[in-house]
Image (cartoon, rainbow, N blue to C red):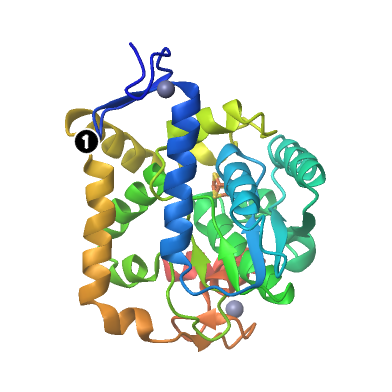
Amino acid sequence: MRCDACPREAVIDQPYRGAHLCGSHFGDSVWERVRREMHRQLPRFRGGTVAIALSGGKDSSVALATAQRYFARRPNVRLVALTVDEGIAGYRPGTIRAAAELTARLGIEHTIVRASEALGVSTDEGARLLPGTVPCSFCGVWRRQLLNRAARDAGADVLVLGFNLDDLAQTILMNLARADLGRLARMAPHRYRAPGLVPRIAPLAQIPEREVFLYARQSGLPFDHGECPHAPAAARNVFREVVWRLEEEIPGTRHALLRTQAALVRSLGATEGGGPAACVDCGEPATGERCRACDYLRLARNPLMGAARS
Ligand code: SF4
Ligand SMILES: [Zn+2]
Ligand SMILES: [Zn+2]
């Protein structure tokens, strides 16, 4: 198969737009979509600090490298990479090594936050203390809070996340299936700065997961391929499978899910604008009286509370 734009051999097909591209035109097409999303999600950004959540996997590594390229000619923009070490044996150490290698190579400031120090509990410990709970439920909540705190401490104006098109389509479908319109409305990209929350953007929103992988490989970025040992228990796996099947049968479904979310957020505008309150335990933003991170921390410290509630 030839590239649609030149006589070279195609390295990838894009069924959602009926295209085939060679390595060079593929690289251009990824960059162009990221550049456009950056521009769309971060309008009127005059300068300041941009934090990038860097796990050391392919997605956040591409997010960091493309953010550096996007802001390359803006000396008034400071980039800082933030990595959360949730404390997951056999998985996190490798990704942290890759993150450190990438930031050293790109010359970007790098901060690592350890859950065991910041919260007093790691994800592995949480999994032992809460055997009936899927680890991703508290791990994701804790990570989000630690990232927000670290971004705020770094004086960040915005936090870049490496979510790709597949990740976002899965999250949208999960929130729809759970009738969780609140969370659907709070998904990145954020247009408003809610009290205590650093707005998050997702510049890889238009890039399918396999294209992010190919782009990372093609660009020679160091990243870790490891899979978290807790991942097989995640509810997301079912939605990953469903989105994958839908996309195969009906190319363009992932993009349509993104448009569905955007249309719903527009009609739910009041929900997104409503700022969160402060958690009674830690003072971080919370949608209820106590934030979900503290809910899980209390359960981990006293698992009997969970048994009594269920
Ligand atoms: S797969 Fe789940 S437990 Fe593992 S790092 Fe991700 S959210 Fe945490
Ligand atoms: Zn080409
Ligand atoms: Zn709290």
Q: In percent of the image, x 50 and y 26: which residue is there? A: 24
The answer to whether residue 188 is seen in the rendering is no
| Secondary structure of the residue carrying numbered label 1 | helix
Location of residue 150 in the rendering, given as x and y in whole percent from the top left corner: 70, 69
Using a 10 Å C-alpha cutoff, classify the residue at mark 1 as few (fewer than 14 neighbours), some (14 to 19) or many (20 or more): some
Q: Dividing the picture into quarters, in which one does residue 32 lie?
A: top left
- Observer-nearest residue: 294 or 185? 185
Looking at the rendering, in which quadrant would you find the C terminus? bottom left
- Observer-nearest residue: 13 or 209? 13
* In this view, 5 is above or below 127: above
Q: In percent of the image, x 63 and y 43: which residue is there? A: 61
Location of residue 200 in the rendering, given as x and y in whole percent from the top left corner: 51, 66
Name the amino acid type tagged 1: Leu
* In this view, 84 is above or below 153: above
Q: Dividing the picture into quarters, in which one does residue 71 lie?
A: bottom right
Q: Is residue 293 left or right of residue 253?
A: right
* In this view, 118 is above or below 218: below
Q: Is mark 1 within 8 Å of ligand 1?
A: no
Q: Is residue 14 left or right of residue 291?
A: left
Q: Dividing the picture into quarters, in which one does residue 47 lie?
A: bottom right
Q: In percent of the image, x 42 and y 54: which residue is there? A: 36
Q: In percent of the image, x 42 and y 12: which residue is there? A: 9
- Observer-nearest residue: 31 or 249? 31
Looking at the rendering, in which quadrant would you find the N terminus? top left
Location of residue 216 in the rendering, given as x and y in whole percent from the top left corner: 58, 33
Q: Where does label 1 land, which residue?
A: 246
The answer to whether residue 59 is seen in the rendering is yes
Find the residue positioned furthest to the left: 250
* In this view, 195 is above or below 132: below
Task: Tell me how many marks there are.
Answer: 1
